[in-house]
Image (cartoon, rainbow, N blue to C red):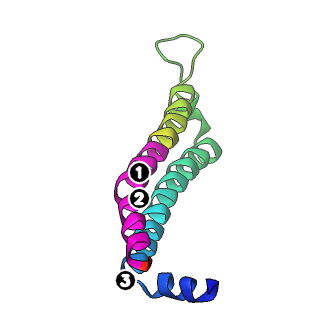
Amino acid sequence: MQSDLVEKVRNNPQYQELVAKRSVFAWTLAIIMLAAYYAYILVVAFAPASLGQTLSGGTTTIGIPIGVAIIVFSFILTGIYVWRANTEFDELTRQVKEAVK
């Protein structure tokens, strides 16, 4: 009985849509985050003087706020994923549940 239910779910077009949309969205966000992070690391590795410039002659360098911005950016991307998961993905999940009952 359990394998029948699994097959019903897997063959459901709404389930396939859910899996495809969620995968594409998750990979897109992951690539965006990795690109931002590795761009920062590459600048640190190959042009450290550009991030080592001080802000208005103080002790804080340009690299500090950029690093903090990357961390904040990761929280924003997480929030975007959660928002979409709680709206679109949860609705598709509900539709799949209703269809296989």
Q: On screen, 38 above or below 95?
A: above
Which is more toward the observer, 30 or 69?
30
The quadrant where residue 67 appears? top right
Q: On screen, 61 above or below 56?
A: below
Q: Quadrant of the N terminus?
A: bottom right
Residue 74 image point, x, y percent:
51, 43
Residue at 55% from the left image edge and 10% from the top image edge: 58
Residue at 46% from the left image edge and 73% from the top image edge: 19
The Cα atoms of the two marked residues, 1 and 3, are separated by: 20 Å
Crowd rating for badge 1 (residues with CA inside 10 Å; few <14, some 14–19, many 20+): few
Whether the residues at callouts 2 and 1 have beta carbons within 8 Å, the answer is yes
Per the rendered image, the range of residues in magenta is 77-99
Q: Which residue is mark 2?
A: 90
Which is more toward the observer, 99 or 36?
99
The Cα atoms of the two marked residues, 2 and 1, are separated by: 5 Å
Crowd rating for badge 3 (residues with CA inside 10 Å; few <14, some 14–19, many 20+): few
Mark 2 secondary-structure assignment: helix
The amino acid at mark 3 is Pro
Q: On screen, 73 above or below 100?
A: above
The Cα atoms of the two marked residues, 3 and 2, are separated by: 15 Å
Q: Which residue is mark 3?
A: 13
Crowd rating for badge 2 (residues with CA inside 10 Å; few <14, some 14–19, many 20+): few
The amino acid at mark 1 is Asn
74 part of magenta stretch: no
Which is more toward the observer, 92 or 37?
92
Residue 83 image point, x, y percent:
39, 47
The quadrant where residue 85 appears? bottom left
Q: Specify whether 64 is left or right of 14.
A: right
Whichever of callouts 3 and 2 sits on the residue coming sooner in the sequence is 3
Residue at 55% from the left image edge and 55% from the top image edge: 34
Residue 66 image point, x, y percent:
51, 32
